[in-house]
Image (cartoon, helix red, strand yellow):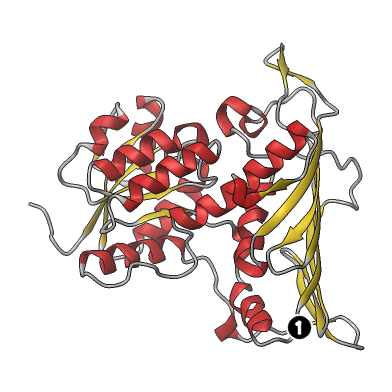
Amino acid sequence: MLNPSKIRIGFIGAGSIARSRHLPNLAVIPEVEVLYVSNRTAESAKKIAGEWRIPHVVENWRDLIAKPDIDAVFIGTWPYMHREMGVAVLNADKHVFCQARMAMNLAEAKEMLAASRAKPKLVAQICPPPTRMPFEPYVQQLIRAGKLGPIVSVELLSHGSANLNPEAVHWRERREFSGNQIMAMGIYAETLNAWVGPYEQLSAFTATPIATKRDGGKPVEIKVPQAVTISGRLKNGGLVLEHHLGLAADKSTPGDRLTIWGRAGTLRYTFGQSIEFAPAGGELKPVDVPGDLKRDWFVEADFIASVQNAMAGRPKKVGINPDFAEGLDYMRKVEAVHVSASSGRAVKLDEL
């Protein structure tokens, strides 16, 4: 017998992030029941079901979406399935939580947003990146309070070594699975949009120095860039320089750092390590961020609260989960990078 006080969920694609975050965090929410799981193989779905006491395995994801006894669907597949599945879930009158990144390209993101706007009573959200946590409330308050003053310049450096191995091909290096997504660029597109606002115009250059890799002994052409440089202007007038690299061969370089220079102060955030602030004329010093200006990972609880609000007719948005409209905004930046790098010209985002 169904429990009307529960939010009943089905999972399509219960991969690593589902096992490490979504399923354990949903398991401790009393109002949640995970009833169904569908994976690429029945064997993997049965394994997940056994580990997390999910009562039903469904071989075809479309059959899962059609189940009348679920309220929401978590989509944990790679981006190449997000548009088709996300639209199908909404058309089935169910709330949807979509694993990041939103889609393969801007056209797919627009289709997903249109589907969500056609169902305004449903929650349509995307998993946010960990880069936005835990200090997003502090950063946003600092900017709103004018502690940085007008933003003059932004620098984002994201350097890693994930693309170095010529004998290993990750799915993120396969354009047929990830689309126009490039390394962590989409993650930081969302982060920058939330903190300093969107680009007005940008130019991008990309490179793929390891153009061919071997996967299981077979050569694979790599079509996802391994180095990206982006420069441009924000809508608020600030200038931006980004550099993303997946081929840092040394042990000292890897790391992600954001610096925001304003006329009244400077903020530097070394992701996963420290956040520093300097007023005009001062030196950068570590900030002891107050607890009420931190927001740790409450992604699953936020989504469930949003669904509960929607069911009760209250405003849906809870926490920092991006909805499909915010997802479209960062997909517009991803598209602009792709268009600029392909055409060799600067791109105005409002034209896309």
Please name whichever residue, 334 or 175, is drawn nearer the observer in this view of the structure.
334
**Left or right relative to 339: residue 267:** right
Question: To which quarter of the image does residue 150 belong?
Answer: bottom right
Q: Residue furthest top?
A: 218
Q: Dot 1 surroundings within 10 Å: few (below 14), some, or many (20 or more)?
A: some
Q: Position of residue 238 (x, y in %)?
A: 77, 67
Please name whichever residue, 55 or 144, is drawn nearer the observer in this view of the structure.
144
**Which quarter shows the C terminus?**
top right
Please name whichever residue, 54 or 105, is drawn nearer the observer in this view of the structure.
105
**Left or right relative to 28: residue 282:** right
Q: Residue furthest front?
A: 351
Q: Position of residue 5 (x, y in %)?
A: 16, 64
> Looking at the picture, does residue 208 appear above or below residue 255?
above
Give the residue number, with chain letter if any, for mark 1.
149
> Looking at the picture, does residue 174 appear above or below residue 183?
above
- The residue lying at 44 percent from left, 57 percent from top is 323
Please name whichever residue, 156 or 239, is drawn nearer the observer in this view of the structure.
239
> Looking at the picture, does residue 172 appear above or below residue 197?
above
Q: Position of residue 282 (x, y in %)?
A: 90, 88
Q: What residue type is disc 1 on?
A: Gly
Q: Residue furthest left?
A: 1
- Report helix, strand or loop for mark 1: loop
> Looking at the picture, does residue 42 appear above or below residue 337?
above
